[in-house]
Amino acid sequence: MSLSATTKTHVSENLPKKPESRAAVIDPAVEPLAELAGPAAPVGPAPRADAPAGDPAAEGFVSFRRTVCHLPRLVGKGTREVEVVLPGGYDPQGRHRVLYLLSAGGSKDTESLRQVVKLGLHDRYGLICVLPTMGGWYPQSSADWMQHVLVPYIEGTYATRGDAEGRLLVGFSKSGWGALSLILCNPDYFGYTISWDAPLMWEDKMGLAKGSYKSMEEFRHYQPVGAARRQAAHFRERARLVVHGSAFWGGHAKRYHELLESLGIRHHYAEGEYGGRPGHRWDSGWLAPALAAMMDQVGVPPAAPMKPRTGKETLGD
């Protein structure tokens, strides 16, 4: 199977809605992962003087390069579609961190990537942002696919840190549960996570997660309460978790925060800090402050406004 991908370039007036083209199946075991490259892609307009205060366009954080590709599943036939957005300051020789956007629905929630680009979060923190087609409650099969297919592909193709410190997760609702359970059960593989408005305190709801977990044993292994108790020693030295929530599952976030405090797990907690009670969706105002809290844990301040790029850069070497 050959390795290929389709690259699209967008600016703020043309944010991603649906993939515009499909790529061939990529088999990391057959083809070198570092061969993905795109055509020269101009990266963004200059800051607009006429943009209102608070508009990302006022600072120039409005442009990006997007690649759509397909990666193989671990079990069965078919592929998973993956979208990758590079920051305007992407350095092919650098060591970028990667933010994995976990869909709360059953497949791929493009609103998460749309908000990242609209708010310029990829540029502000120099993040490679990855949106895979996956969903549900992120059980063992999701962890296996990420560790054996998705992450190796991303780190073999782009200029990344290639370690846990460079692997960031964010999710809300079901995927907020998943973002926490993935890092709690794999503390040496993932570095930091954001969980927004998720049902974290469910300890006996296997029926609601039917179809994701194969057994009650697997459910309990990934359940965030039990996982936190079991793995607390890995998270006491420094803060790696962001737990926010004030919409649909706000009470769960508060109780989970109290549990983490009782276990001595360092974390960032906030509830109702976004000018009201944000709705239970990606575009309700929580993503930017939650990511700011995570990047403060990471130790990466927001970048200064970006300058226009030459447009001569490609997506990789």
Image: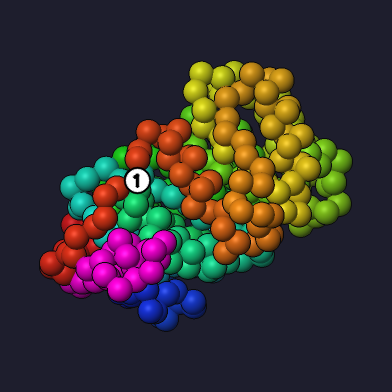
Q: Residues within 10 Å of mark 1 (few under 14, many from 20)?
A: some
Q: Position of residue 281 (x, y in %)?
A: 64, 62
Mark 1: which amino acid? Pro
What residue is shown with label 1? 302
Residue at screen point 49% across, 40% down: 293
Going 29% across and 53% down the picture, which residue do you hit?
A: 158
Q: Is residue 220 left or right of residue 39?
A: right
Residue at 53%, 41% (x, y): give it.
193
Residue 118 relative to residue 79: left or right:
left
Which image quarter holds the N terminus?
bottom left
Percent of width and height locating residue 299: 37, 33
Q: Of helix, strand and loop, which one carries label 1?
A: loop
What quarter of the picture does the C terminus occupy?
Answer: bottom left
Instruction: Report x, y in % for residue 197.
Output: 68, 49
- Residue 52 sits inside the magenta stretch: yes
Query: Colour scheme used in the picture?
Result: rainbow
Instruction: Please give the range of residues in magenta.
Output: 38-66
Please give left or right for residue 231 compared with residue 289 in the image: right
Nearest the eye: 80 or 171: 171
Q: Does 23 appear above or below 264? A: below
Tell me the quarter of the picture where residue 244 sits: top right
Q: Nearer the viewer, residue 284 or 115?
A: 284
